[in-house]
Amino acid sequence: MQQQSYDIPLHDIKPIVEVQEFSLYYFSALVVVGTLLALFFLYLLFRWIKRKQRFNLRKEYKKLLSQAALQNPKQAAYDITRYGALFQNDTPRHKEMFANLVARLEAYKYKKEVESLDPETIGYYNLYKEMCDV
């Protein structure tokens, strides 16, 4: 008996070719870009939070100016002068109003016994307090 060869030439099938595979590189690049974007947004979030938590002297003085105890006129005169001085250089109107307020408060400073604040001085104080912004 004769041996048969099964190596029949196939004319319709092409030989195996190597296909370039770049999906791993695309995925790696996508991961790197995504990580960089996430880090950038975390950095922006961190800066925003730090800016919100920063101590604001104007805000603190505005709060202390609003809380001046008018029941104790001598201490109130000193507090209003001290905390209001920060806002006097905002505009010429602030400077003029502060000078007027300090002139009215001079009667309540440097004395041992003082009477309560008069309504006109309280009105000037409330007006100046409303003018000050943070």
Image: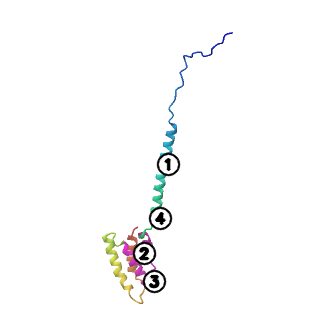
Q: Which residue is mark 4?
A: 53
Rendering coords of residue 108 (x, y %): 39, 85
Q: Secondary structure at mark 2?
A: helix
Contact, CB < 8 Å: mark 4 with mark 2?
no
For image coordinates 36% across by 83% down, the residue present is 106
Whether the magenta-drawn stretch holds residue 81 is answered as yes
Q: Would you say 37 lies left or right of 95 here? A: right
Rendering coords of residue 132 (x, y %): 39, 70
Name which of mark 4 and mark 2 comes first in the sequence.
4
For image coordinates 52% across by 39% down, the residue present is 24
Q: Which residue is mark 1?
A: 35
Disc 1 residue type?
Thr
The alpha-carbon separation of the residues under discs 2 and 1 comes to 47 Å
Q: Secondary structure at mark 4?
A: helix
For image coordinates 50% across by 48% down, the residue present is 35
Please tell me whether mark 3 or mark 4 is closer to you in this view: 4
Q: Which residue is mark 2?
A: 65
The magenta region covers 58-86
**Residue farthest to the bottom, as pictured:** 112
